[in-house]
Image (cartoon, rainbow, N blue to C red):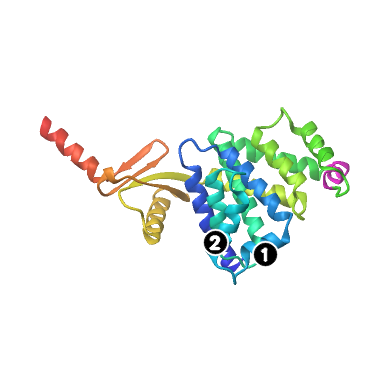
Amino acid sequence: MQGSSRGSLVAAQERLETLLGVPGTDRAAVADALFAVTGVLDSSAALRRALTDPSRDGQAKAGLATNLLQGKVDGAVVDLVAGLARSRWAQSRDLADAVELLAVTAEVAAAQERGELERLEDELFRFRRTVDGDPELRSAMTDRTASGERKAALVSALLEHKVCASTLRLARQAVLAARGLRLDAVLTTYGEIAAKRREQLVAHVVVAMPLEADQRERLAAGLRRQYGRDVHLNVDVDPDVLGGIRVEIGDEVLDGTIARRLDEARQRLAR
């Protein structure tokens, strides 16, 4: 993606990560809903144009997306897609591409939550190698005249009960909805998303007031220098911290909040 589409995708990815970081969020369900939205967008060029028309008011486009999806998918996903419609896109096709990437990210996050992220990455690679190495199998999976049921049955026969749930879900998506791309290219993209997430640290940040964009960038840069890896920020606002910042990365906690300092002062006075 280029130009405005790239910026809109980055903003949407941030909103998705915030959603995925909410306790109790069913990440696999978010992925399923976003894949369903991708299918709706793929099926209607007129809808894609209506949702990405730069001459239309952003709020009107968001309203169209909301009316289309309300009651059909979870409200948080409706809000996410409405935000995508409100954004600017260089090409109408970019919107469907963005929703699919968000769906894959959510499925990869579901695998991560189950402790299966490395397994997912390995299984996607092996599935791609298996298909690439068998011309007859590759032809059967990419045959445009074959029914979806037949292709789904073929994927199930190859992978069901042998791979994790996310691998099976993404393999089916790649085979049944390649969206005009080569199957190996789709599987490669999915694997790259899994690899990127596996290499990225996630920091849970608690602050008293919302962080400005430049503050988020400085914090992410500082943590990247400290840990030597990219760090994604999941930011929660909690007025009870009074001021300062609390950062949790894995089992490590960096607590610079005023509330923490007050607690420490009270403990010293109590001795």
Which comes before the other along the chain, label 2 or label 1?
A: 1
Query: Is 255 left or right of 182, judged from the image as shown?
Result: left
Which quadrant, please, contains the C terminus?
top left
In reply to whether residue 122 is colored magenta, the answer given is: no
Question: What's the residue at 67%, 64% (across, down)?
Answer: 49
In reply to whether residue 135 is colored magenta, the answer given is: yes
- For label 1, the residue is 49
Q: Quadrant location of residue 216?
A: bottom left
Q: Nearer the viewer, residue 116 or 145?
A: 145
Image location of residue 36, percent across then percent down:
67, 46
> What mark, if any, has residue 206 been given in the picture?
none
Query: Is 224 left or right of 140, judged from the image as shown?
Result: left
Q: Nearer the viewer, residue 251 or 209?
A: 209
From the image, give the main secondary structure of the stretch colored magenta: helix
Image location of residue 105, percent across then percent down:
59, 46
Amino acid carrying mark 1 in the image: Arg
Q: So how many labels did they put on this image?
A: 2
- For label 2, the residue is 86
Specify the segment rendered in magenta: 134-142
> Looking at the image, which residue sits at the far top?
161
